[in-house]
């Protein structure tokens, strides 16, 4: 090849591969042949490709009719498998909607 271009040749998944390390070698055609190496580290950045997930899709809770107002009867918890501690993995809202019959 006439250039030192490094190309992506397949799918890269940040949740599986964080960094890619390669060695690039350049050689001339002289006699004797002379070469040099360069180390290249590619850091794979995360995209928001994982949706937040609840551990259970259906939950049933029971409460007494005498339960006081403002009593917490359930706390929904979800996780997001994008890279931890990044904007892509931060859950910012939960919405409670009535189910129509």
Image (cartoon, helix red, strand yellow):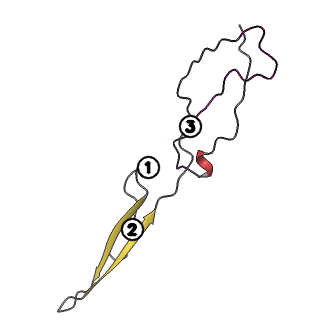
Tell me the CA gap for discs 1 and 2.
18 Å
Q: Tell which residue pokes out farthest to the left in this image.
A: 32
Tell me the CA gap for discs 1 and 3.
18 Å
Mark 2 or mark 3: whose residue is earlier in sequence: 2
Horizontally, residue 87 falls left or right of residue 41, namely right
Nearest to the observer: residue 50 or residue 33: 50
Badge 2, how many Cα within 10 Å: few under 14, some, many 20+?
Answer: few
Q: Residue at coordinates 76% horizontally, 7% vertically from top-left?
A: 65
Q: Tell which residue pokes out farthest to the bottom in this image.
A: 31
What percent of the width, then of the height, locates residue 76? Answer: 64, 28
Nearest to the observer: residue 76 or residue 20: 76
What percent of the width, then of the height, locates residue 27? Answer: 26, 83
Residue 5 in sight: no
Kindly identify which residue carries mark 2. Answer: 6
**Which label is found at residue 85?**
none
Horizontally, residue 61 falls left or right of residue 33, namely right
Q: Point out the stretch of residues depicted in magenta.
A: 64-84
Kindly identify which residue carries mark 1. Answer: 13
Displayed quadrant of residue 79: top right
Mark 1 or mark 3: whose residue is earlier in sequence: 1
Q: Which one is closest to the eye, mark 1 or mark 2?
A: 1
Nearest to the observer: residue 24 or residue 60: 60
Residue 85 in sight: yes
**Which label is found at residue 79?**
3
């Amino acid at each position: 090849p006439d250039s030192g271009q490094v190309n992506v040749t397949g799918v890269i998944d940040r949740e599986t591969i964080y960094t890619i390390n390669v060695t690039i070698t350049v050689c001339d055609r002289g006699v004797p042949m002379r070469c040099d190496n360069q180390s290249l580290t590619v850091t794979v950045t995360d995209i928001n490709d994982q949706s937040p997930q609840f551990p259970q899709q259906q939950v049933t809770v029971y409460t007494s009719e005498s339960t006081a107002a403002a009593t917490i009867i359930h706390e929904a918890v979800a996780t997001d498998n994008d890279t931890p501690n990044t904007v892509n993995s931060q859950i910012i809202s939960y919405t409670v909607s009535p189910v129509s019959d």
